[in-house]
Amino acid sequence: MSNPANILILGVGSGDDRVAALEAASYRCTIEPAGSDVIAAIERHRPGVVLVSVAGLGGLDAITEIKGNAEARRVTVAAIDIGDAHDVLRACREAGADDVFEDDTEDHVLVARMRALARLGGMEAELVRRAATAGEFGVTVGTDIPRDHDDGSGKLLVVGAAEGELEALCPLLPRSGITFVTEPDPYRARSRIEGSENESFDGALVYVRNEEMREKCDYFCRAVRNDRRLFDLPLFLVTEHGAFPHHAAAYDEGANVVAEAPVDCDFVDNHLHMLLRGRERRYAIGRRIAATVDEKTMDILGNVYSSEFTRAHLDRLAREKAERGTFSSAILFFVPTIGEVAALYGLEEAALLRQQLASWLAALVRVEDTIGRTGADEFLALLPETGMSEADLVRKRVVGVLHQSEFRLTDNVPVGIEVYVQSGIAELRAGDSLEDTISRASDLLE
């Protein structure tokens, strides 16, 4: 099960095609009628995402109520069934919606965009969990992050469009309050968005004019999504008809929202601002989660958690499995190369390699994932609200990066060290101990 998030849907019928599409993608959906006590429903069902039918009774008011409640506002909210009334998209955005699905949104687009919403909801939930575990070790981290006012600002790199072309595509965008910097070449755009030229961007608007440009833009999008530092940057794609015969392919390459030319300026403007607001939210959550890595919770290597913290946090996730039926997975990483380095070059060199690997592992997983050292040369990653198939993708990506990298030690080691990493995954079960999880993951080491 790759998308195990709970979704609460307000104001639609049980036979709604969108419910079937989400459940087919392994989301767990619960429906409440329009006019329900939305705060009580959230407390009862504890969803990661709430979809609110604006066409239903008090839909906009429900979004405002959720975002105004200190506990409920941790939940990600999206509007559906918005109709065609003037300025309703802006009204949803101003009410605090994290996304808005227009009435002509296809089911596969709904499912594709749900990934980012579910992840944001999962980050919110993990902050609460991680802070609670850190509290057991005497580290206090606040979990209430106020909803920032949408000031309409931000700086985006426009990829694939020539100077002045953006104004032709969407004349109102230059007055949106967002700063746009144009880079026609997607390959050069990758370098610029990485910050190699002392520039900083909050996301990218990618213009795909034809199939030839599509290949270059695919490269740019994949480069952003595969870079741990850039992973959360929003990507908005504008495509000419035929450049992407199926928009699902654009979402598979990492796009957050896709619009086909000729574009509706209101659509682009409001969705860009919601994407930028979501980015700021994720960064704020990430900073709070990072604050739980403290001298009281970290391993002596730094950057990763101690085995004691990892055990306590795994216990918390296992209890949630028992109480709520949540899904979490674990990845075990064992690095025999460290022992080989110790035998060849000494304990000091092995310790340096171990420290470098700890830093790399912490940087290669998502901010909501917990990396702890559970043995001399063994690390465990806890992936909350993540099924086995998705955990396996993470495992392969991390191992792939490590296997393709060289680690430089002291001058006593004249060559770069190529590491060999064994890894295995396990799904957390109710009542699991740290040893139980490691044992099952060890059985699948490869």
Image: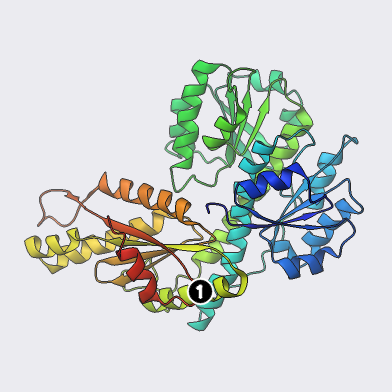
Is residue 227 found left or right of 322 in the rendered image? left
Depth check, front residue: 90 or 387: 387
7 lies above or below 194: below
Question: Does residue 70 appear to the left or right of 435 in the view shown?
Answer: right
Residue 27, position as x, y percentages in the image: 63, 53
User: Which residue is located at x 79 percent, y 51 percent?
Assistant: 14
- Image height check: is 92 above or below 380? above
Residue 202 drawn at (x, y percent): 58, 42
Asked whether residue 439 appears in the rendered view, the answer is yes
**Quarter of the rendering containing residue 380:** bottom left
Please give left or right for residue 158 compared with residue 266 in the image. Answer: left
* Residue at (71% x, 39% y) in the render: 271
The residue under the point 45% across, 32% down is 190
Return the residue found at the far front.
15
Residue 216 percent location from the top left of the image: 47, 24
Which image quarter holds the C terminus? Answer: bottom left
Q: Badge 1 is on which residue?
A: 430
Which color mode does the image show? rainbow
Q: Relative to 268, does residue 423 appear above or below in the rendering? A: below
Identify the residue shown where x is 7% and y is 60%.
344
Other-residue count near label 1 (Cα within 10 Å), few / some / many at <14 / 14–19 / ≥20:
some
Q: Of the residues shown, which amino acid type is indicated by label 1?
A: Ala
Q: Nearer the viewer, residue 102 or 24?
A: 24
